[in-house]
Amino acid sequence: MANSVYHSSIEGAQHGAKSLAEFLAYAKRSGAAGAQPSNYMLQDGSGFKSAQEIRAAFSQAGLRLDGVSGHCPIWVHTTAWTGSPTIRPFIPAEVAQKSPAEIEAWAEDYVLRLLDLLAELDMKIFPMFWGVAFGWEAATGYPWGFWAGPGYDLLKEGQERFVTKTAKIRAHARQLGIKLCHEIHPGTAAATADEFLSLVSICDGDASLAVNADPSHCWEGESFESRFLKVGERVYACHIKNHTVRPGLPVRSMEPNWSKRAMQFTDLGSGDLNMQRYAELMLQIGYPQRYCKLTGAPSAPLVVEAESAHKDLDFTSADGIAYVRDHFQWPAAAGSFEDGMGA
């Protein structure tokens, strides 16, 4: 629809089995107007595809480049210090054998080179999430008061660690005008709006620190209204995703099977969250205007990140793209509906 504030897009991280060309062809067949490939889709050997090659792929597919998803390498960078084996799926096998400090240095170099590629592509949007900078104890959110004690203060140490470890990446992003769009998410350096604002504060208001909005990670008391009203001025990227919370089951458990968990991601139309209210909230906080001003794009993407415990990935993603196309292609109000009354 002409003058629509939104267009349909798709996140590439879940589609890592596809090459860039395969991912873009799938997105186009599914009716997307744009796409957000993962960093892995842009790799070529030990480096990255050229900006020219990436532009050509998007041009051939007839799709907009809506950002580059870099969740995994950033998470590795800010989590490696813990020694957790959970970073291994996201790094080369030979790198995984190195020490935590060496892995962190590798991830930092990788991210800096990826930011350079974004700059060549004239892309300012980098959806990601910071890793476990405050440690796994604090990341669990467990309410025992053991985060500070004789000779340690996990929160204070975490703040110092975050500022120090992310300094080079933040400085490079600022220099390039790129927004590091943290997805407020459990198991990261900021799982709530207040925690994200704390990161901004300890980094002296760093302009590179931005938010990738995603309502589906609001399942433990903080609503998406509350969360994104608080951080609204820093929202530069936007996933659209739904979930359901099954009553009577424990939200936190060591159950690896998604189909048995209490919180499950769903297709856009059948979850507990009202996607229309979410899209309207994004308009209220200025996300589309902010995205378009920064990138020069005529509309802002609602990036489908479809995950389902019960439905096929490609089916769920295509269904999500169609849902955005059919339900969110509307022009924003230019004024109040009362303006013409009594004229």
Image: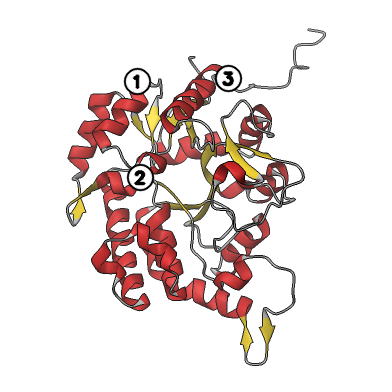
> Which of the 4 image quarters holds residue 198?
bottom right
> What residue lies at 35% left-to-right and 45% top-to-bottom?
38
User: Looking at the image, is 278 positioned above or below residue 31?
Assistant: below
| Residue 136 figure quarter | bottom right
The x, y position of residue 27, in whole percent, is 36, 27
Closer to the chain start, of discs 2 and 1, is 1
What element does badge 2 sit on? loop
Q: Which residue is mark 1?
A: 29
Q: Mark 3 or mark 2: name the one nearer the start of the chain.
A: 2
- Which amino acid, mark 1? Arg
Crowd class of label 3 (few under 14; some 14 to 19; many from 20; radius 10 Å): few
Q: Which mark is residue 110?
A: none
Query: Residue 113: percent from the left, percent from the top?
Result: 27, 58
Number of numbered labels in the structure image? 3
* Residue 98 drawn at (x, y percent): 29, 75
Few, some or many residues within 10 Å of mark 2 (<14, 14–19, 20+): many
Asked whether, in this view, residue 168 is left or right of residue 219, the answer is left
Which residue type carries mark 3? His
User: Is residue 74 or residue 52 the one in the foreground?
Assistant: 74
For marks 3 and 1, the one nearer the N-term is 1
Q: CA distance from mark 2 to mark 1?
A: 19 Å
Who's the residue at 69% across and 34% down the image? Answer: 272
**Which quadrant of the view contains residue 313?**
top left
Residue under pointer 3: 327
Which residue position holds label 2?
38
Q: Nearer the viewer, residue 276 or 52?
A: 276
Q: Residue at x 41, y 41 (%)?
A: 14
For the residues labelled 2 and 1, say whether their Cβ atoms are less than 8 Å apart. no
Decide: marks 3, 2 in contact (CB < 8 A)?
no
